[in-house]
Image (spheres, helix red, strand yellow):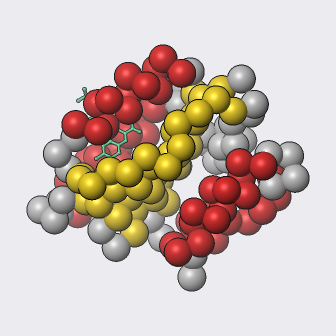
Amino acid sequence: MTHSICYVSSATDNLNENEMDLLFNTVLHKNKGLNITGILLYYYGNFLQVLEGDEEALKSLFETIKKDKRHQNLITIYDKKNDHSIFDEYKTGFSIIKTENDLKNLKAYLKLSEDKEPLSTSVLGLLKPFLI
Ligand SMILES: Cc1cc2nc3c(=O)[nH]c(=O)nc-3n(C[C@H](O)[C@H](O)[C@H](O)COP(=O)(O)O)c2cc1C
């Protein structure tokens, strides 16, 4: 049993490219240390994040993320227990999705895991507006 949280938010408009890279590096580094898998997708000013891992670690991280001034208008899509994590076998466990190619690869991976894991279908649905 693992825990999964998914939300969308919008970046505050004063984030430049360097600040964004700094954020992405922190996220990758810290999530690796906490054994958190998932994705952080950034697309035209909006974030979509899926976090998976130990419930306590995730809840505490989510409280920190909610207070982060680099984004606003956060809407939680789900916050629930799940039988399996979807992303533990994807790349390095936690991935930043920035380019169309990243999105294409992610979509292909989720399509493959749809049979094993119904939550993949729901994440694929959420990604639809982002998929070209
Ligand atoms: C959209 C967004 C997503 C974030 N995702 C994560 C995350 O997955 N993991 C993480 O450790 N911090 C994430 N952060 C950063 C945290 O809010 C916080 O700044 C960071 O964890 C603090 O790290 P520090 O205490 O080592 O400075 C995110 C911030 C934003 C704006």
* Direction bottom: furthest residue: 132
Q: Is residue 61 left or right of residue 101?
A: left
Residue 101 appears anywhere in the view? no
Residue 130, x across and y down, in percent: 51, 73
Residue 116 is at least partly visible in this image: yes
Which residue is nearer to you in this view: 30 or 61?
A: 61
When asked about the image quadrant of residue 121, the answer is: bottom right
| Residue at 78% from the left image edge and 62% from the top image edge | 111
Question: Number of marks in the image?
Answer: 0
Pick the front one: 103 or 76: 76
Quadrant of the image containing the C terminus: bottom right
If the image is split into quadrants, where does the N terminus sit? top right
In the rendered image, residue 50, in percent from the top left (x then y), is placed at 52, 46
Vertical arrangement, residue 98 with respect to residue 78, above or below = below
In the rendering, at what x and y percent does residue 84 appear? Answer: 74, 33
x and y percent of residue 128 in the render? 59, 72
* Image-quarter location of ligand 1: top left
The residue shown at (31%, 37%) is: 65
Q: Residue at x 73, y 65 (%)?
A: 108
Residue appearing at x 38%, y 32% in the figure: 62
